[in-house]
Image (cartoon, rainbow, N blue to C red):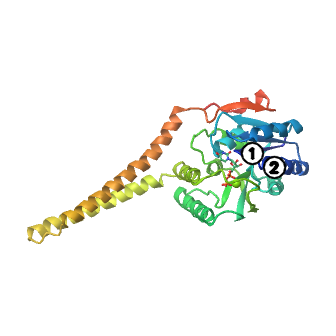
Amino acid sequence: MPTYSLVIPVFNEEETLPELARRLSELMERLDGDCEVILVDDGSRDRSFDIMTDIHSSDERFKLIRFSRNFGHQVAISAGMDFASGQAIIIMDADLQDPPEVVLEMTRHWRAGSDVVYGVRKERLGETWFKKTTAAMFYRLLRKFTGMDIPVDTGDFRLVDRKALDAFKSLREHNRYVRGMFTWVGFKQTGVKYLRSERFAGSTKYPLSKMLKLALDGILSFSFAPLRFILTGGIFITLASIVVGLCAIVTALFRHPILPSLGIMTVILAFFTGIQLIVVGILGEYIGRIYEDVRNRPLYIVHDTVGLKDESKVHIPKN
Ligand code: UDP
Ligand code: MG
């Protein structure tokens, strides 16, 4: 059993993989224990898997999981953690935005007794103004909404002790917000500040649609705030309509009706129809997630694995 398992999700990263392997080999020389690297190919359509196979052939500490299709970043890291056998598991991106050197600092905190050591981004290099601003706003909003101590400016780059990992593995929800799930499991958590580098090569695999989906998963799987907001809004509108209705009756009795013209009525009606559709949409987002979870499908389908013993699959909890 290795001391450290490095879990890396890979989606169309042919340009970064050789450099990643080089930097990880360097890191493994400096770590104070045996290591394995679990590369999870999340349905890449480029040469990523071939390159991963070459990397494995030259160093068997690199082990591979290949999905049958693209299941998404959050599922890929979850699969890597299902197969990891180390005492401490480290999650990193394949594009070298999470500097391997920071891992050394994380392991020191782990040795000192922390169960989850997460990276806090001091600054993000080479990312758009739009991404930085929306991300900063989102992390703060999420904290407010959930009332949970989800650390701000923190991605999935982290070291996790086996205890926290086993707890995490019992959470099999489908729409996953991994960083929030690690807050949820608790244990002793420590943040390490770091400078997020630029992507080594290639372009982001997180288009706006995937970012929005992740943000929605973060809010909906940790908070009922949107539902409470609907309830409060509904109560407010109902009370206001009663007051206006009473005023309308009284003024009509005195032959000075205050109700607006048909045109304005139409606009008001359209407005509230819109609000009702939004409300139905929000309910639908929750219901869709319930449906996905009750169907109880596996989180991912593995095409094949390289270098991993079948026994490691025994660790996968039943859904
Ligand atoms: N990734 C993945 N599946 C996906 C999208 C991304 O496994 O569907 C991987 C990707 O290869 C990288 C990590 O997730 O290792 C983070 O993606 P990326 O660097 O593109 O996101 P960004 O840093 O731009 O937010
Ligand atoms: Mg990246």
Quarter assignment of residue 319: top right
Secondary structure of residue under mark 1: strand
Relative placement, left or right, of 166 versus 4 is left
Give the mark nearer the N terminus: 1 vs 2: 1
The amino acid marked with disc number 2 is Leu
Foreground residue among 112 and 154: 154
Cβ of disc 1 within 8 Å of ligand 1? yes
**Residue at screen point 77% across, 28% down:** 311
Foreground residue among 43 and 307: 43
Q: Which residue is mark 1?
A: 8
Q: Position of residue 164 (x, y in %)?
A: 71, 45
Quarter assignment of residue 139: bottom right
Q: Which residue is mark 2?
A: 20
Confirm whether residue 103 shows in the render.
yes
The answer to whether 167 is drawn above or below residue 244 in the figure is above
Relative placement, left or right, of 118 versus 178 is right
Discs 1, 2 touching: Cβ within 8 Å: yes
Foreground residue among 257 and 199: 199
**Residue at screen point 61% across, 62% down:** 131
The answer to whether 292 is drawn above or below residue 156 in the figure is above
**Quadrant housing the N terminus:** top right
Q: Position of residue 103 (x, y in %)?
A: 81, 54
Q: How far is mark 1 from mark 2, CA to CA?
A: 10 Å
Cβ of disc 2 within 8 Å of ligand 1? no
Instruction: Residue lying at the far right in this picture: please name it.
Output: 29
The answer to whether 212 is drawn above or below residue 305 in the figure is below
Q: Position of residue 86 (x, y in %)?
A: 80, 40
Q: Looking at the image, is mark 1 or mark 2 nearer the viewer?
A: 2
Relative placement, left or right, of 40 versus 177 is right
**Residue at screen point 63% across, 30% down:** 318
The amino acid marked with disc number 1 is Ile
